[in-house]
Image (cartoon, rainbow, N blue to C red):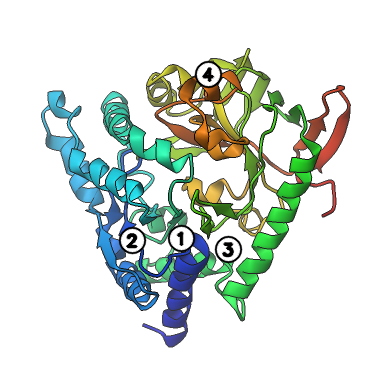
Amino acid sequence: MPRDFQQNLDKYAEVILKVGVNLQAGQRLLIGWPAAGLYGTPIELAPLVRIIARKAYEMGARLVEVLWSDDQIRLIRFQHAARDTFAEIPRWRAQAAIEAAQAGDALLRLSAEDPDLLSGQDPELIALVNATNAEHLTPFYQMLTRNAMNWSIATAPVSGWTEKLFPDLPADEAQARFWDALFQICRITADDPIAAWQEHVRQLVARSETLNRKQYAALHLTAPGTDLTIGLPKRHIWSGARMRTQAGIAFTANIPTEEVFTMPHAGQTEGIVTMSKPLAYGGALIEGIRMTFSGGRLTRLTADKGEQYLRKVLEIDEGARRLGEVALVPHSSPISQMGRLFYNTLIDENAASHIAVGRGFRFAVQNGAAMSDEEFAAIGGNSSKIHIDCMVGSGEMDVDGLTAEGMAEPLMRAGEWAFEV
């Protein structure tokens, strides 16, 4: 292993723990909570996980535990298991995440999978597995949306995904290229990555604070195939890079991150939107997505590929057809400028402005964490077992903030910020 690569890997682990999770001395760390069809941390990433674990103990962690998963075991199930068994999941994995959140432990997920893993498998069975998993994880995500604990999501190359990105390169060279790209977009190649992240976080926080002072009544997004108005609840909160737990621990939920985001009003989205990038979700790839909203609800959905699967996913509950997030990302973000689709939502959502169908974040509205479900719904909050980010931004998108008086103020023009901070 080249020395400079090992040094960058060590720096990456430090950024994940110090900037992302912000692990505190005396905390326990759980790596690999389940999500969608993923049961845990890809076993292929063991070398990186071991570095993270060692550094976590050096930072004073009481205990580091890992929930492992294997994509090939997952695929074998779809190929050979009895068709009437797919409503079964290993519930103990969900319970491990729930108990860790309840205890105030730190949590890290390494989101990495082959985007074509389940290509050709029954979309209804894929949707069933994802829905069953989401059902049992509902208590966990209720705590996550209230920032009950410090958590973060990062990624790393795995087989299948690497070949998807660099199909014309030998395996070793493809993996090296992938790591190079990841180190670049995660600011690991800076002389001092931690300092680089601190400045990046400062800029995103400043932009979100400007939007919080504005308190727009709605956003208006326009681009080819998109004319969408998204209402915002009163006292909504924009966040960018830095969030805080209920106990006051600052953390960065995504490594990388380029977004500022908030919670839409669940009943106030109107118009049409065309996704600017494909969506990789739960082992399936959906392309050419077009949505129409009326009264806040998704009323029409089409897709060039994977439409049946996505429709099945959105049947999980009523909230799955309403918005839970809107995020603004400049077209000039380092990820966007690579001009590459990564087939991974964590990375791709930071290349483009995006919306999310499903669960809203309680921390995205004042006093949201203390609200009952009924109070949250009354102010326009959306509840769902899922949260799926869909990329809509591009270099052709304009975004306006609409005041309560109906005045439009430019926020983005041609995909770039239209105001200074």
Q: Nearer the viewer, mark 3 or mark 2?
A: 2
Residue 238 x, y percent position in the rendering: 67, 42
Question: Where the N terminus falls, by quadrant?
Answer: bottom left
**Secondary structure under the numbered disc 2 in the rendered image:** strand
Label 3 or label 2, whichever comes before in sequence order? 2
**Secondary structure under the numbered disc 3 in the rendered image:** helix
Mark 2 nearby-residue class (10 Å; few <14, some 14–19, many ≥20): many
From the viewer's side, name the closer residue of 23 and 47. Answer: 23
Q: Is residue 416 left or right of residue 358?
A: right
- Answer above or below: position of 19 versus 78: below
| Three-letter amino acid code at the position of disc 1 | Val
From the viewer's side, name the closer residue of 206 and 67. Answer: 206
Residue indicated by mark 4: 301
Residue 34 x, y percent position in the rendering: 31, 45
Label 4 or label 3, whichever comes before in sequence order? 3
Residue indicated by mark 1: 21
The answer to whether marks 2 and 1 mark residues whose Cβ atoms lie closer than 8 Å is: yes
| Three-letter amino acid code at the position of disc 4 | Leu
Mark 1 nearby-residue class (10 Å; few <14, some 14–19, many ≥20): many
At horizontal 76% and vertical 27% (from top left) the residue drawn is: 217
At horizontal 63% and vertical 36% (from top left) the residue drawn is: 366
Q: Quadrant of residue 412?
A: top right
Label 3 – label 2 distance at C-alpha: 25 Å
Label 2 or label 1, whichever comes before in sequence order? 1
Q: Is residue 344 left or right of residue 58?
A: right
Residue indicated by mark 2: 29
Label 4 – label 2 distance at C-alpha: 40 Å
Q: Is residue 136 left or right of residue 224?
A: left
Q: Nearer the viewer, mark 4 or mark 2?
A: 2
